[in-house]
Image (cartoon, rainbow, N blue to C red):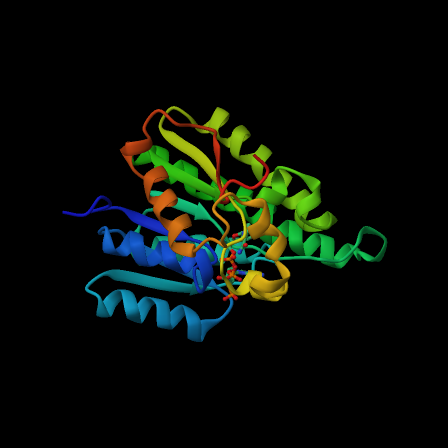
Amino acid sequence: MGKLDGKVALITGSTSGMGRDTAYLFAKEGAKVIVTGRNEARAKAVVDKIKADGGEAAYIIADTSDLAAVDVIFDGAMKAYGKVDILMNNAGQLSVTPILDLSLAEWTSVMNVNVTSALLLTQKIAPIMKKNGGGHIINIASVAGCAAHWGPVAYCTSKHAMMGLTKAMALELGPDIHVNGICPGAIRTAMLDSAGGEDAMGFMKQRSPLGRIGEGSEIATTALFLATDESSFIDGQLIRVDGGVDI
Ligand SMILES: NC(=O)c1ccc[n+]([C@@H]2O[C@H](COP(=O)([O-])OP(=O)(O)OC[C@H]3O[C@@H](n4cnc5c(N)ncnc54)[C@H](OP(=O)(O)O)[C@@H]3O)[C@@H](O)[C@H]2O)c1
């Protein structure tokens, strides 16, 4: 018997990286998984693998830099499985542009993908969760939400906002909806590659007592904990999964 039997999990940004690893783990634990992202070939590959492994999944293609995409995701999720029990707001856009060079367009895109779409999706899905007796929301922030030295202005601000959003959501959506977040450190994904890869991130290894980069599967297992009653008295918390950097 799986830990998520009978549950429907919507994971934004699950065409790659830690979202994809979480999709695989949740499906293995019995959840029907809704995969989202912009890249259809990758989305289809994730769904095909889940099905080949005996699970159930569907995908929705949507670019949340345009907030109209939130309706596409919500409508697609309802059409696919009629409910959502677990929402993981994970899709993220990296930005490395320094403050004096940052355009309003880039700022808006980062905020839409990393924060505002999570708010709007939650506004649509929380009433469905409440109607069905409850649910779990897991927001993916970052160590860049804990301190400014991890990343330039738009990304850093969006992740700080994601942390505040997580606490505010928990306060307003309880007691039937549990809201928590994860602050990943350096995790081996396409986003890390786009930031220069493991070599460029060598300083992060040095700051970690564990002396290594993390894996998406290590975010997935934390998300699973937060998606089940194993975390029943944890609410409004941001769990750092970062190898102990900054301690
Ligand atoms: N990797 C790290 O070291 C690290 C550290 C701290 C926090 N994080 C956070 O972890 C989350 C997952 O990132 P990751 O590291 O797993 O990176 P990733 O492999 O690049 O995955 C990012 C996901 O977000 C989706 N996405 C990006 N822009 C989108 C858009 N405009 N509309 C819809 N979907 C979009 C991507 O889908 P498509 O490509 O199909 O659009 C992809 O599925 C992000 O929120 C990121 O900020 C990562």
Question: Is residue 51 or residue 200 the one in the foreground?
Answer: 200
Q: Which image quadrant is residue 164 in?
A: top right
State the residue lying farthest toward the right. 100
**Residue 41, placed above or below residue 158:** below
Question: Is residue 109 or residue 154 the one in the foreground?
Answer: 154
**Left or right placement of residue 47 versus residue 110 in this view:** left
Q: Residue at x 52, y 55 (%)?
A: 91
Q: Position of residue 68 (x, y in %)?
A: 57, 56
* Visible residue check, residue 133: no
The count of marks equals: 0
**Residue 168, placed above or below residue 82:** above
Q: Position of residue 165 (x, y in %)?
A: 57, 35
Q: Residue at x 68, y 49 (%)?
A: 151
State the residue lying farthest toward the bottom. 41
Question: Is residue 229 or residue 56 the one in the foreground?
Answer: 229
Q: Residue at x 54, y 58 (%)?
A: 69
Q: Which image quadrant is residue 231 in?
A: top left
Q: Position of residue 141 (x, y in %)?
A: 55, 44
The quarter in which the C terminus is drawn is: top right
Q: Position of residue 216 (x, y in %)?
A: 42, 55
**Left or right placement of residue 26 versus residue 42 in this view:** left
* Visible residue check, residue 232: yes
